[in-house]
């Protein structure tokens, strides 16, 4: 395991080396998960790209840190990690809150971003009322009290079959996140609005969404793509909010085609 102290926080990360002539892809995970959600995508990309995955503050094996904090704080952690690893430019693939972090990183440090892969995310996610309701419930009853509702947003009915042991595993992942970090990140999402910033993104960008995403539905993700100049838009069939788990082959193919297009102008499939 690899750890780095960034902004006085221990950040858990993994760096997988790749060919020097290929880009670096950074994966930022969603609320209530750790970087293991990217495993089935990473195994398909390893050897062809340099890859960085990490647990954002308050998640996985990273420190919770001083709360409250903002999406900009999350982006500062990522910038610090990339500086430490001497990564000058990278494709940032952010899922859900990870996509907000990717947008915040571009806003603060555009020099670091070669392209944006915004996966099941938006310029603004949810409402103040919806986030306050979730925060109140988790603060009083714990993360376990919302698992069933969240899983319906994350995964398709086919994935949520009782006999699917992976479904139980991802439920465990959510429950076992630090409550303080989960709540602080809920507050950060609630307060984040990149509507205006999205219109000023000038690097190659693609917005991707599962066709059954209950957290950031296709129409919301499509509206984000329309805000970003020349952004591409893709829908992944038979996937909910976390296509890297349900449809890793499809997501990997889109990532490969998009990075090829961004670097060489080749036609994306």
Image: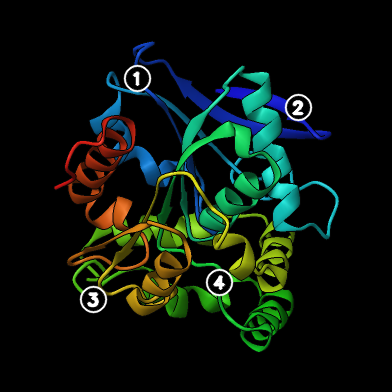
Circle 4: element type: helix
Which image quadrant is residue 167 in?
bottom left
Q: Which mark is residue 157?
A: 3
Q: Around disc 4, counting alpha carbons within 10 Å, would you say few (fewer than 14), some (14 to 19), or many (20 or more)? A: few
Q: Position of residue 130 (x, y in %)?
A: 61, 85
Q: Are marks 3 and 1 in contact (CB under 8 Å)?
A: no
Disc 2 or 3, which lies upstream in sequence?
A: 2
Which numbered mark, 2 or 4, is in the foreground of this view?
2
Does residue 23 appear to the left or right of 145 in the view shown? left
Circle 3: element type: loop
Q: Are marks 4 and 3 in contact (CB under 8 Å)?
A: no
Residue at (27% x, 75% y) in the render: 212
Circle 1: element type: loop
Q: Are marks 2 and 4 in contact (CB under 8 Å)?
A: no
Q: Are marks 2 and 1 in contact (CB under 8 Å)?
A: no
Q: Position of residue 96 (x, y in %)?
A: 49, 61
Circle 2: element type: strand
Q: Are marks 2 and 3 in contact (CB under 8 Å)?
A: no
* Distance in Å between CA atoms under marks 1 and 4: 42 Å
| Residue highlighted by disc 1 | 22
* Distance in Å between CA atoms under marks 2 and 4: 30 Å
């Amino acid at each position: 395991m690899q750890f780095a102290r960034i902004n006085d926080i221990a950040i858990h990360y993994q760096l997988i080396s790749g060919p020097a002539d290929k880009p670096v892809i950074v994966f930022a995970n969603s609320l209530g998960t750790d970087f293991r959600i990217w495993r089935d995508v990473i195994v398909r990309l390893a050897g062809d790209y340099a890859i960085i995955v990490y647990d954002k503050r308050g998640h996985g094996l990273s420190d919770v840190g001083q709360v409250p904090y903002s999406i900009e704080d999350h982006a500062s952690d990522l910038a610090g990690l990339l500086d430490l690893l001497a990564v000058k430019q990278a494709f940032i693939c952010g899922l859900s809150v990870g996509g907000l972090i990717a947008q915040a990183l571009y806003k603060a440090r555009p020099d670091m971003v070669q392209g944006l892969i915004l996966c099941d995310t938006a310029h603004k996610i949810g409402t103040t009322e919806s986030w306050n309701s979730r925060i109140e419930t988790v603060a009083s009853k714990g993360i376990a009290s919302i698992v069933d509702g969240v899983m319906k947003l994350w995964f398709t009915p086919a994935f949520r079959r009782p006999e699917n042991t992976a479904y139980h595993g991802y439920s465990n992942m959510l429950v076992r996140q630090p409550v303080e970090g989960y709540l602080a990140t809920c507050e950060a999402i609630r307060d984040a609005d990149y509507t205006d910033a999205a219109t000023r993104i000038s690097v190659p960008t693609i917005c991707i969404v599962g066709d059954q995403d209950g957290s950031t539905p296709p129409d919301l993700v499509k509206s984000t793509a329309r805000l970003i100049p020349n952004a591409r838009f893709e829908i992944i069939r038979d996937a909910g909010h976390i296509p890297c788990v349900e449809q890793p082959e499809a997501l990997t193919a889109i990532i490969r085609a998009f990075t090829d297009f961004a670097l060489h102008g080749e036609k994306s499939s």
